[in-house]
Amino acid sequence: MAARPLTGRRATWSAPGRVNLIGEHTDYNDGLALPFAIPMRTTVHGVAREDTSVRVSSTGRDPIEFGTSATPGTVIGWGAYVAGVVWAMSSAGHRVPGVDLEITSEVPVGAGLSSSAALECAVALTVADIAALALGAEDIVTIARRAENDFVGAPTGALDQTASMFGRTGHLVCFDALTMSCEAVPCEPEGEGLVLLVIDSGVVHRHVGGAYARRRAGCADAAAQLGVPSLRALDVGSLDRHLARLDSRYQPLVRHVVTENERVRRTVEHLRARRLREVGPLLTESHASLRDDFAVSIRELDVAVVAAIDAGALGARLTGGGFGGSVIALVPRERMDDVVQGVQGEYADRGFGTPSFMPVAPSAGAGPTSDPTRR
Ligand code: ADP
Ligand code: MG
């Protein structure tokens, strides 16, 4: 049977960035995380071409072009995220046509809000629609993650893409990397007089760098030394016994991962009981663990956490991989102005850059969007 002509087929899909409320550096240890989709989204409008070129424009960047058979290493820079999706789809056996893609985004780049996953998921959904591929949300997660891991070369877990695809208004996404499953957990801060506030330090993080890869490798080595398939197999009750058997350089890494999984479990319990306020101290404990044990924080993030709490936040932690990016703070609505001013004041006193502030209610995941050229 002849393939249906795709030329001229068009589609527009958008996918959100995400904030991870808690559960950091756990996903590549088969662990638990609790991200949610944020209101800021990346939108991709696509039209099928007659040839096998992919031409991509993104606001504020030079357009790029590559072929549908581009392989890892042949497209670099931001185009790699797009070419990686096309490559991951083709390598999975799907026929991908040439396509023109137009990208617009509200997700800040490099702020720890996962502009990369938003971009990958929106591109994958748009291309899949144009190519009439029957792909489910899990397939899109797999394709997007492969693009980032094997084409861009960033060894991240599937957390970001899962949050972007499975986010739901008024819910967090409890992601279990062991079973690759997720469950919606209700979270409506405004109903409890609270705000989830993102504080962007303005320091752009770097994922592809060696620091992330070293910690990831350290966790894998520690699991091997303990003879378990992954650090998920360890529970907090027997942590000390496990630590005693470990090479000292791995102890802080393992302590972070095991206690962080436990903090995610306790957070879910509080949320199910509609006790969001009680989550505050767990956020702050998570930050201390990331700062002292996992060693992925920087001064700008530490100062934002302390200043936010001093000004009335119930808890705060760095969110995302660390080394820059953002802090997520749980703030009583009436203390919002104090927190903003408190952080701004501390940043000014220390000569840090200008922080930005974004209240982020848990929002909808990826989905089709109206065609921007037909509005
Ligand atoms: P984060 O995902 O936390 O924002 P990453 O370093 O993982 O940070 O991904 C950021 C990179 O993703 C950018 O440097 C750029 O290459 C690419 N990117 C993200 N959004 C866009 C966009 N709208 N247009 C082009 N490239 C983008
Ligand atoms: Mg990213």
Image: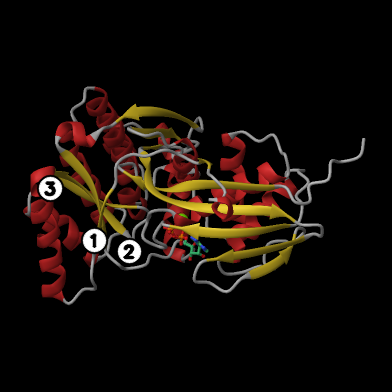
Task: Specify few, some or many for label 2: CA neighbours under 10 Å numbering under 14, 14-19, or 20 or more.
Answer: many
Q: Secondary structure at mark 1?
A: helix
Q: Residue at x 47, y 45 (%)?
A: 28
User: Mark 1 vs mark 2: which is more N-terminal?
Assistant: 1
Query: Vertically, is 26 above or below 192?
Result: below
Q: Is mark 2 within 8 Å of ligand 1?
A: no
Q: Secondary structure at mark 3?
A: loop
Q: Which mark is residue 313?
A: 3
Residue picked out by circle 2:
324
Residue picked out by circle 1:
301
Q: Residue at x 64, y 56 (%)?
A: 84
Alpha carbon separation for disc pair 1 and 2? 7 Å
Which is more toward the observer, 165 or 177? Answer: 165
Q: Is residue 165 left or right of residue 20?
A: right
Q: Is residue 153 left or right of residue 39?
A: right
Pick out the residue farthest to the front: 375
Please provide percent x and percent y for residue 101: 63, 58
Q: Is mark 3 within 8 Å of ligand 1?
A: no
Pick out the residue farthest to the bottom: 351
Which three-letter amino acid code belongs to the residue tagged 1?
Leu
Q: Is residue 339 left or right of residue 135?
A: left
Query: Vertically, is 273 above or below 91?
Result: above
